[in-house]
Image (cartoon, rainbow, N blue to C red):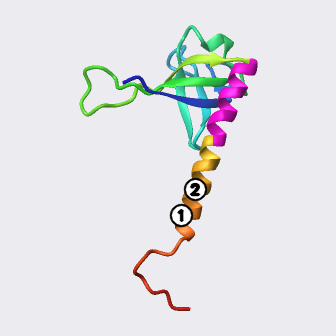
Amino acid sequence: MVNFHVGKVLKVIKPGKDVIASDASVQAVIEMWDGNELVLNIEPSLAPSTKIHDIVLVDYNPIKGVSPAIPRQEIIKVLKGKPGKELWEMFKKYLAAKTKKKQESADEPIPGITYSR
Protein backbone atom coordinates (compact mmCIF):
# COMPACT_ATOMS: atom_id res chain seq x y z
CA MET A 1 0.00 0.00 0.00
CA VAL A 2 1.33 3.43 -0.94
CA ASN A 3 0.41 6.19 1.47
CA PHE A 4 1.02 9.93 1.14
CA HIS A 5 -0.42 12.95 2.96
CA VAL A 6 -0.94 16.48 1.67
CA GLY A 7 0.42 19.48 3.54
CA LYS A 8 1.10 23.20 3.20
CA VAL A 9 4.47 24.73 4.10
CA LEU A 10 4.18 27.30 6.89
CA LYS A 11 7.91 27.82 7.49
CA VAL A 12 11.21 26.47 6.14
CA ILE A 13 13.99 25.86 8.68
CA LYS A 14 17.53 25.70 7.31
CA PRO A 15 20.96 26.18 8.84
CA GLY A 16 22.09 29.79 8.81
CA LYS A 17 22.83 32.84 10.90
CA ASP A 18 19.92 32.30 13.31
CA VAL A 19 19.71 28.49 13.08
CA ILE A 20 22.72 26.62 14.48
CA ALA A 21 22.63 23.05 13.15
CA SER A 22 24.63 19.86 13.51
CA ASP A 23 24.08 19.06 9.82
CA ALA A 24 22.90 20.60 6.54
CA SER A 25 19.39 19.09 6.60
CA VAL A 26 16.36 21.31 6.01
CA GLN A 27 12.99 20.94 7.73
CA ALA A 28 9.60 22.55 7.22
CA VAL A 29 6.71 23.33 9.53
CA ILE A 30 3.72 21.81 7.73
CA GLU A 31 -0.02 22.26 8.16
CA MET A 32 -1.41 18.90 7.18
CA TRP A 33 -4.72 18.68 5.31
CA ASP A 34 -6.41 17.42 8.49
CA GLY A 35 -5.28 20.37 10.63
CA ASN A 36 -2.27 18.79 12.33
CA GLU A 37 0.99 20.73 12.32
CA LEU A 38 4.29 18.86 12.05
CA VAL A 39 7.97 19.60 11.54
CA LEU A 40 9.28 17.29 8.81
CA ASN A 41 12.49 16.71 6.90
CA ILE A 42 12.57 17.87 3.29
CA GLU A 43 14.20 15.44 0.85
CA PRO A 44 17.60 17.13 0.23
CA SER A 45 17.17 17.65 -3.53
CA LEU A 46 13.88 19.50 -2.90
CA ALA A 47 15.09 21.73 -0.08
CA PRO A 48 16.36 24.65 -2.22
CA SER A 49 13.04 24.95 -4.10
CA THR A 50 10.65 24.49 -1.15
CA LYS A 51 9.02 27.79 -0.13
CA ILE A 52 6.33 29.02 2.28
CA HIS A 53 2.79 28.28 1.00
CA ASP A 54 3.95 25.43 -1.25
CA ILE A 55 1.77 22.33 -1.20
CA VAL A 56 3.78 19.18 -0.51
CA LEU A 57 3.34 15.42 -0.48
CA VAL A 58 4.64 13.69 2.61
CA ASP A 59 5.72 10.05 2.38
CA TYR A 60 3.83 8.10 5.05
CA ASN A 61 4.93 4.66 3.88
CA PRO A 62 6.44 2.54 6.64
CA ILE A 63 10.22 2.56 7.00
CA LYS A 64 11.42 -0.85 5.80
CA GLY A 65 12.86 -3.19 8.39
CA VAL A 66 11.42 -1.30 11.38
CA SER A 67 8.91 -2.96 13.69
CA PRO A 68 6.45 -1.75 14.75
CA ALA A 69 5.85 0.12 11.51
CA ILE A 70 6.87 3.77 11.64
CA PRO A 71 5.93 6.17 8.80
CA ARG A 72 8.81 7.79 6.93
CA GLN A 73 7.28 11.31 7.24
CA GLU A 74 9.52 13.07 4.72
CA ILE A 75 8.55 15.67 2.11
CA ILE A 76 9.11 14.00 -1.26
CA LYS A 77 7.22 16.25 -3.72
CA VAL A 78 6.53 19.98 -4.01
CA LEU A 79 3.40 20.97 -5.97
CA LYS A 80 3.68 24.55 -7.19
CA GLY A 81 0.85 26.70 -8.56
CA LYS A 82 -2.49 25.36 -9.77
CA PRO A 83 -1.90 21.59 -9.20
CA GLY A 84 -0.97 22.20 -5.56
CA LYS A 85 -3.82 24.63 -4.95
CA GLU A 86 -6.38 22.24 -6.47
CA LEU A 87 -5.13 19.27 -4.42
CA TRP A 88 -5.13 21.31 -1.19
CA GLU A 89 -8.69 22.55 -1.82
CA MET A 90 -9.89 19.01 -2.63
CA PHE A 91 -8.59 17.65 0.67
CA LYS A 92 -9.90 20.61 2.70
CA LYS A 93 -13.38 20.17 1.15
CA TYR A 94 -13.28 16.48 2.04
CA LEU A 95 -12.35 17.34 5.64
CA ALA A 96 -15.12 19.95 5.90
CA ALA A 97 -17.73 17.47 4.62
CA LYS A 98 -16.46 14.74 6.96
CA THR A 99 -16.51 17.12 9.94
CA LYS A 100 -20.04 18.31 9.08
CA LYS A 101 -21.31 14.74 8.75
CA LYS A 102 -19.72 13.77 12.07
CA GLN A 103 -21.31 16.79 13.79
CA GLU A 104 -24.73 16.01 12.31
CA SER A 105 -24.57 12.38 13.47
CA ALA A 106 -23.49 13.53 16.96
CA ASP A 107 -26.62 15.68 17.15
CA GLU A 108 -28.96 12.73 16.42
CA PRO A 109 -30.49 10.96 19.43
CA ILE A 110 -29.38 7.40 20.07
CA PRO A 111 -32.29 4.95 19.49
CA GLY A 112 -33.63 3.35 22.67
CA ILE A 113 -32.34 6.04 25.03
CA THR A 114 -34.72 8.41 26.76
CA TYR A 115 -33.42 11.93 27.19
CA SER A 116 -34.64 14.10 30.05
CA ARG A 117 -34.88 17.84 29.77
Q: Amino acid at mark 1?
A: Ser
Looking at the image, which is closer to me, 4 or 36?
4
As helix, strand or loop, the secondary structure at mark 1 comes to: helix
> Dot 1: within a 10 Å radius of its alpha carbon, few (fewer than 14), some, or many (20 or more) residues?
few
Residue topped by disc 2: 101
Q: From the top left corner, tell me how far across and down residue 84 is, in percent.
A: 68, 23
Q: Quadrant of residue 14?
A: top right
Quadrant for the N terminus, please. top left
Was residue 94 drawn as part of the magenta stretch in this picture? no
Q: Amino acid at mark 2?
A: Lys
Quadrant for the C terminus, please. bottom right
As helix, strand or loop, the secondary structure at mark 2 comes to: helix
Q: Residue furthest front?
A: 111
Residue topped by disc 1: 105
Q: Quadrant of residue 79?
A: top right
**Which segment is the magenta one?**
81-93
